[in-house]
Amino acid sequence: MALPPFLEGSGREYFNPGLGSVWDVAFLDGQQVPGIVKCVPKTARKVDEANGPGLDAATLRLQGVSAGTFSLVIVVWTQVQIDALDQLLARVAPVAGRTVYAQGKYTTTTTPTPGNPSQKRPASFTFYHPAAFAAGILSIIVEEIEWFGDGPVAQSKQVTLGCKQALPSKKVISGTPQLNAANVAGVADSPKGSGKAAP
């Protein structure tokens, strides 16, 4: 798989081959994630199976594509890496507030607390890892974080980010269904869409 050599619009290389394997490196919000990472994205199509009781076959109704998901496992083992990871997590960690989608990004206006007024901060971030790039995942939302557990080797620490692909927001149409002639036709003693109750 051919990898783009530079982070888009930054002039920074995605990866220095002298550092090891390209599969051990990821970039989140334009910054190289410290330590070693593991990323195995999953993408899926939403499929509704319309099937009657006792029937073997089903009618498949394809309903678009779900947002891609993955866990980004980060392993660090030096104090310098831990400090860099702390700074990165402070930027991308979920915060309470109102999140909106505009101009291709999600932004959260944080909930004000005593001594800390509300502020706007990004809720979606650029992301690069070869597996995510292959899956078409270029921007993510960090849904959850498992903070600093023991890593796979002695004196290492591990942080796991639960990530979801940041897809464009769509308007949700909601409301109360209204009776009308089209959807009550054929129902015995129906009000026929008049708005009046049947006698």
Image: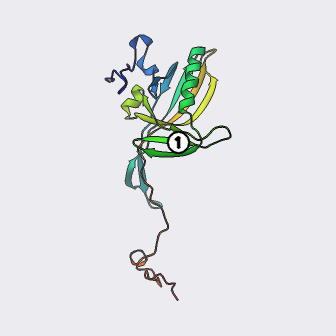
Q: Position of residue 47 (x, y in %)?
A: 41, 50
Residue drawn 33% across and 20% down?
A: 5
Question: Are there few (<14), some (14-19), or many (20+) residues within 10 Å of tag 1?
Answer: many
Residue drawn 54% across and 24% down?
A: 74
Q: Position of residue 190 (x, y in %)?
A: 46, 82
Quadrant occupied by the N terminus:
top left
Q: Is residue 149 left or right of residue 14?
A: right
Q: Is residue 155 left or right of residue 36?
A: right
On screen, residue 68 above or below 196: above
Asked where in the image residue 93 lies, by quadrant, the reply is top right
Asked where in the image residue 128 lies, by quadrant, the reply is top left
Q: Which residue is under mark 1?
A: 108
Q: Residue furthest top?
A: 18
- For mark 1, give the secondary structure: strand
Residue drawn 38% across and 53% down?
A: 60
Q: Position of residue 33 (x, y in %)?
A: 49, 22
Q: Position of residue 52 (x, y in %)?
A: 45, 61
- Looking at the picture, the colour scheme in use is rainbow
Looking at the picture, tell me which residue is in the foreground, 77 or 184.
77
**Amino acid on which the number 1 mark rests in the picture:** Thr
